[in-house]
Amino acid sequence: MIPAAGRWARSPKALMLLALLPLIGLGATRDGPARVVVQLAVAVVAAVGVDLGMARVRQEGRFPWDGAVICGLLVGMVLAPLTPPGVAAIAGGLAALSKHMLRAGSTHVFNPSAVGLLAAGLAFPGSGQSWWGALGDLPAPFILLVLAGGTLIAFRVNRMPSVLAFLLVFFAALTLVAAWGGGGIHLALAFRAPFSNAAVFFACFMLTDPRTSPTRPADQASYGATTGVASLLAFFFLSGFGYLLVGLLAGNAWQALRRGMGPRPAARIVEPAPGPLAR
């Protein structure tokens, strides 16, 4: 048991939880610890419950509880603290359910947290997303803490090209549009907190999901750039922070499509053994 616990403590998921905890603690000081704890607990319990139930239905021997916990925490850290607990539960549950229902082969296609958040937002238009876990309501220097923890995660899961490509494409494209005189005040908001904090948090903690992002550096750069372009387009048509989630799902879909269109290894032809007459 102890060696297994030691291996888990060195895993990317353990590091992810460790990186999220300071952000939760600091964000809670702004929005109220009691309210934040309830929201996180509801989202996590719903995600873990649905994931465990589906694992039993699918007769999977091992239940990866840490993935469900991270999924619930991300949902809770994005939803506005005034969101009703029932909506947080639905978002967390749908996020976990998407891992089992929206699959291609042996793995899920779309980022679970993004699916749950967008589905809950469509079902309950009054529910908001504040991305309080990105510390956008705290003084500007706190974004460095988000960037430090996120960079550590990106390096640990070997997804730094995705992060850099997304941030470069997204903010460079915004700068070009602003230089051409488009967007006005709406565009200027993307460069300020909490929108800038949300983009950094998104790139480091959600875009880098190992199960829904590519592994090769060139593919990661393409994935991050595609997500950046899709997020930019959604930014001009959607209110609130939904544009990041739409961009992520578009990037996931593009990545899945590329995998489907990619070359497949040739089947190995095994010659039959010679029969007794073939001598």
Image (cartoon, rainbow, N blue to C red):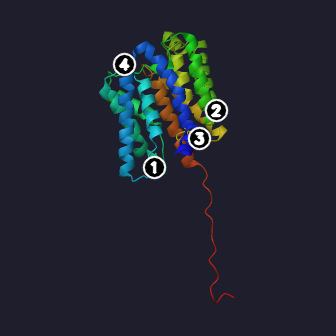
Amino acid at circle 3: Pro
Of the image marks 4 and 3, the number of the one nearer the N terminus:
4
User: Could you tell me if the residues under marks 4 and 1 are in contact, i.e. CB atoms within 8 Å?
Assistant: no
Query: Nearer the observer, disc 2 or disc 4?
Result: 4
User: Could you tell me if the residues under marks 3 and 2 are in contact, i.e. CB atoms within 8 Å?
Assistant: no
Is 225 or 146 nearer to us in this picture?
Answer: 146
Does residue 120 sit above or below 239 in this rendering?
below
User: Could you tell me if the residues under marks 2 and 4 are in contact, i.e. CB atoms within 8 Å?
Assistant: no
Q: Secondary structure at mark 2?
A: helix
Mark 2 — residue? 155
Amino acid at circle 4: Ala
Mark 3 — residue? 214
Q: CA distance from mark 4 to mark 1?
A: 33 Å
Which residue is painted at 35% across and 39% down in the image? 49
* Residue 219 point in image, percent of width and height: 63, 39
Mark 4 — residue? 34
Of the image marks 1 and 3, the number of the one nearer the N terminus:
1
Amino acid at circle 2: Phe
Q: CA distance from mark 3 to mark 2?
A: 14 Å
Of the image marks 2 and 4, the number of the one nearer the N terminus:
4
Q: Which mark is residue 62?
A: 1
The quarter of the displayed image where residue 173 is located: top right
Is 140 or 28 nearer to us in this picture?
Answer: 28
